[in-house]
Image (spheres, coloured by chain):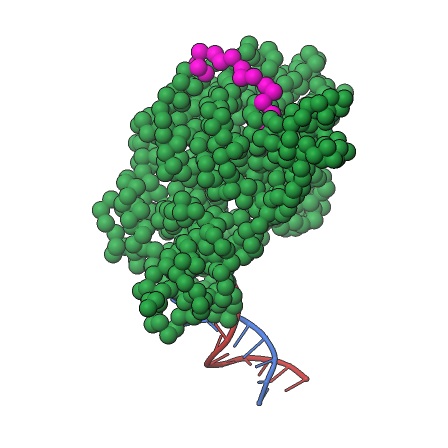
Chain colours: A green, B red, C blue
DNA sequence: AGCACGCCGACT
DNA sequence: GTCGGCGTGCTC
């Protein structure tokens, strides 16, 4: 009497389709649920698949349909909430369903491993009898602590909290505590030892705005450096914590500092799960499972980078996206999703509050706030008596600049050091010099595989292309005319370091860039004198801008930030301003208002003046006007098709053909730019081209992309061409 | 994406 | 004669 049924399976393949399979012999319909994984035969191989649907209308002839090999899960690994999110990713980013759904899973689950965490010993409070521990203060302390931790802790948590196996062993002997094996608990234990800080007027207003509305309540919290955003976050989530819910805190790629974690840990009696890039696959799976199996017994705070937004969280009740403007929220390969946007979607679908916090909000979020999609809350005062660093512009045009930095600025450094303070020189360019050139014939050190110059490095000496990683020994003569007068042109971190060391022999010069911080704790080692408060000079790249506190840094000098002023990328100015503010924020974080000086050849640039004389907010509004005038995002929506090939012109031809094919499907309100060569056409041996698709209406763009999906995936005849689609691209690269 | 299948050049 | 190059097409 049972009617035959089929399983619609999604595979982790770049195939924009699903595949139907028969169930196992002797199995029944209710053995299968959407969101379970199965192993299936696929061609000659075996693949992990995800059940998308259970149905009785196969899309091919039934005799071609094979049965699955086995069912991996007893219960779904993806809830219907996450399945819907995966389908949403497919609809929005137009990548194959399978790939979208599989990116929601931790790597080990994608590979078909069973959804089991490693096991670890846990301790449970069995019985409270204070008399039995009267003479044992450590045992008493453990019981008290255990009571606070909801009567259960893992072995590791107990050790972290300073208890020894012998203390616990004695309690087990007294039968006050029992031990059992359970899923590995990698969470840090929060302990509410710290009270909420007093809020200033602005913070109070902010908290009121965040809490006054129930349900989906997106808030853009625009707060200048040092205005106490974190305290607002902490107080905003406290009710979710009291209700033992889950809270998701997204942070930038390198923004997870011990200080941040400690703030959460010392405030809340909650489990704190960290999902950062340092975890291995098994640890990540453990954390994911722990979040996905959360029970309403103890609050859980999940702190993680971009991909943490895909964590299964059945009791999710609040989301925070810190430094929402940060570029690391945008995935730059595969499914090019934006973690911040996904966070907003999740909050909307769950009907919960979300805070997007930043000192320098992205124009996208600012626009959403201005059109009242988000509540806009500003914190303009620095907490305490710290005064903001003034942004000064230093005109370099009529100055002598020997090694990339003006003499007068060197004098400022000298004064700073004499006062016993520290100085920071920021230059977003590692190596000794960006170019090696020959004054006799004009030869320059170009990379063979890229339209770029090879950077000159001295420590150790070599030429290095930062775009394709090609390395080459340093020539002593011009390869072209054999002149021996070849020389470095321009300055990078190494050259500045050398020059500053020469000029300030009595002080340490510390270089922080990707090359100097290779080892595991190299960065912290190097920064030791800075933390000790010694007068010294820091020279470095963006690495210095994030997540560090340098209380003794009282002078910040920024070199070469003007390279973004005239970029082809319309977002360059926005990004530059955010970077400038972030770097400037390193100065005088605690002390007597520091100085932040921008050395530039374009001292007259009106937008730079706006930033210096007004603030980021004023600049952002001006940039929004420009975007509006030129119909650029956030006033228009874009998708970018990138293509590349080892053969010149082939990628462009491919995009031309694509454009021809999709043009007939074009409706009103869709326009194209290109195909054009990418800003750096040749990169790592591949010639790159791009085609922009634009519309003023998101829905029209989405509709059009949906219609051209089959054409994108079908276009044949260019087998050396690789292509990708980027919805809401964040740069032109 | 894999992987098989198939059709042409060069090599024991 | 056959080994292997990669262009083409399919996977329920
Ligand atoms: Zn020469
Ligand atoms: Zn290169």
Residue A409 is at least partly visible in this image:
no
Residue A484: x %, y % from top left: 70, 44
- Image: A375 above or below A339: above
Quarter residue A114 falls in: bottom right
Q: Considering the image in quadrants, where does the N terminus of chain A appear? A: bottom left
Residue A417: x %, y % from top left: 69, 16
Query: Which sits in the foreground, A231 or A292?
Result: A292
Residue A485: x %, y % from top left: 68, 41
- Left or right: where B1 falls relative to A183: left
Which residue is at 73% across, 32% downward? A174
Residue range of the region highlighted in magenta in the rendering: A190-204
Which residue is at 70% across, 49% downward? A473
Residue A38 is at least partly visible in this image:
yes
Which residue is at 32% across, 44% downward? A694
Query: Which sits in the foreground, A400 or A149?
Result: A149
Query: Which sits in the foreground, A184 or A539?
Result: A184
Residue A589 within the segment the image draws in magenta? no
Residue A695: x %, y % from top left: 29, 42
Task: Spot the residue most to the left.
Answer: A668
């Amino acid at each position: 009497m049972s009617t035959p049924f089929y399983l619609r399976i999604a595979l982790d393949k770049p195939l924009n389709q699903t595949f139907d399979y028969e169930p196992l012999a002797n199995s029944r319909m209710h053995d299968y649920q959407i969101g379970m994984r199965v192993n299936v035969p696929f061609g000659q191989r075996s693949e992990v698949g995800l059940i998308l649907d259970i149905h009785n209308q196969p899309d091919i002839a039934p005799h071609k349909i094979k049965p699955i090999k086995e069912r991996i899960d007893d219960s779904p690994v993806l809830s219907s909430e996450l399945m819907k999110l995966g389908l949403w990713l497919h609809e929005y980013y137009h990548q194959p369903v399978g790939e979208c759904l599989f990116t929601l899973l931790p790597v080990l689950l994608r590979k078909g491993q069973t959804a089991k965490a490693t096991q670890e010993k846990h301790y449970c409070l069995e019985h409270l009898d204070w008399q039995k521990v009267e003479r044992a203060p450590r045992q008493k302390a453990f019981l008290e602590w255990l009571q606070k931790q909801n009567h259960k802790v893992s072995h590791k948590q107990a050790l972290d909290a300073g208890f020894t196996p012998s203390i616990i062993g004695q309690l087990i002997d007294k039968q006050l505590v029992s031990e059992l094996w359970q899923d590995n608990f990698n969470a840090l234990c929060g302990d509410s030892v710290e009270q909420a800080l007093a809020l200033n007027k602005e913070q109070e207003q902010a908290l009121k705005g965040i809490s006054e509305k129930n349900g989906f309540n997106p808030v853009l919290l625009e707060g200048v450096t040092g205005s106490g955003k974190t305290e607002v976050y902490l107080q905003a989530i406290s009710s979710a914590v009291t209700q033992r819910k889950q809270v998701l805190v997204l942070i930038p790629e390198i923004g997870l500092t011990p200080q941040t974690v400690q703030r959460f840990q010392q405030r809340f009696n909650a489990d704190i799960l960290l999902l950062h890039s340092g975890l291995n696959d098994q640890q990540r799976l453990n954390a994911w499972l722990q979040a996905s199996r959360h029970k309403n017994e103890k609050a859980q705070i999940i702190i993680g980078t971009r991909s943490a937004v895909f964590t299964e969280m059945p009791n999710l009740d609040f989301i925070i996206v810190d430094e929402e403007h940060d570029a690391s929220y945008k995935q730059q390969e595969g499914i090019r999703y934006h973690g911040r946007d996904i966070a907003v979607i999740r909050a909307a679908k769950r009907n919960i509050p979300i805070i997007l916090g930043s000192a320098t909000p992205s124009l996208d979020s600012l626009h959403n706030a201005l059109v009242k999609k988000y509540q806009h809350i500003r914190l303009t005062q620095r907490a305490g008596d710290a005064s903001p660093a003034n942004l000064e512009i230093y005109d370099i045009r009529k100055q002598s600049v020997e090694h990339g930095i003006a003499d007068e600025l060197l004098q400022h450094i000298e004064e700073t050091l004499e006062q016993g303070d520290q100085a920071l020189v920021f230059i977003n360019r590692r190596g000794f010099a960006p170019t090696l050139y020959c004054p006799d014939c004009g030869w320059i050190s170009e990379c063979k595989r890229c339209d770029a110059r090879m950077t000159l490095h001295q420590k150790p000496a070599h030429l290095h292309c930062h775009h394709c990683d090609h390395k080459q020994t340093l020539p002593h003569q011009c390869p072209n005319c054999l002149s021996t007068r070849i020389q470095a042109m321009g300055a990078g971190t190494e050259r500045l370091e050398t020059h500053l060391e020469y000029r300030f022999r009595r002080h340490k010069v510390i270089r922080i860039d990707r090359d100097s911080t290779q080892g595991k704790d190299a960065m912290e080692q190097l920064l030791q004198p800075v933390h000790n408060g010694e007068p010294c000079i820091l020279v470095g790249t963006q690495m210095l801008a994030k997540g560090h506190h340098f209380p003794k840094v009282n002078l910040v000098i920024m070199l070469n930030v003007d390279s973004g002023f005239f970029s082809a990328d319309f977002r360059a100015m926005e990004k530059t301003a955010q970077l400038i503010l972030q770097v400037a924020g390193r100065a005088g974080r605690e002390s007597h208002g520091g100085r932040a000086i921008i050395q530039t050849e374009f001292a007259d640039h009106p937008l730079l003046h706006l930033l210096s004389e007004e603030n980021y907010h004023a600049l952002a509004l001006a940039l929004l006007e420009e975007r509006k005038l030129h119909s650029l995002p956030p006033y228009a929506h874009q998708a970018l098709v990138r293509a590349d090939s080892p053969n010149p012109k082939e990628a462009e031809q491919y995009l031309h053909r694509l454009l021809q094919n999709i043009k007939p499907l074009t409706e009103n309100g869709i326009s194209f730019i290109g195909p054009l060569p990418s800003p750096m056409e040749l990169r790592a041996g591949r010639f790159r081209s791009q085609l922009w698709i634009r519309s003023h209406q998101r829905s029209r763009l989405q509709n059009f992309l949906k219609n051209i999906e089959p054409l994108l995936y079908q276009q044949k005849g260019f087998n050396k061409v690789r292509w990708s689609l980027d919805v809401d691209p964040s740069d032109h690269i």
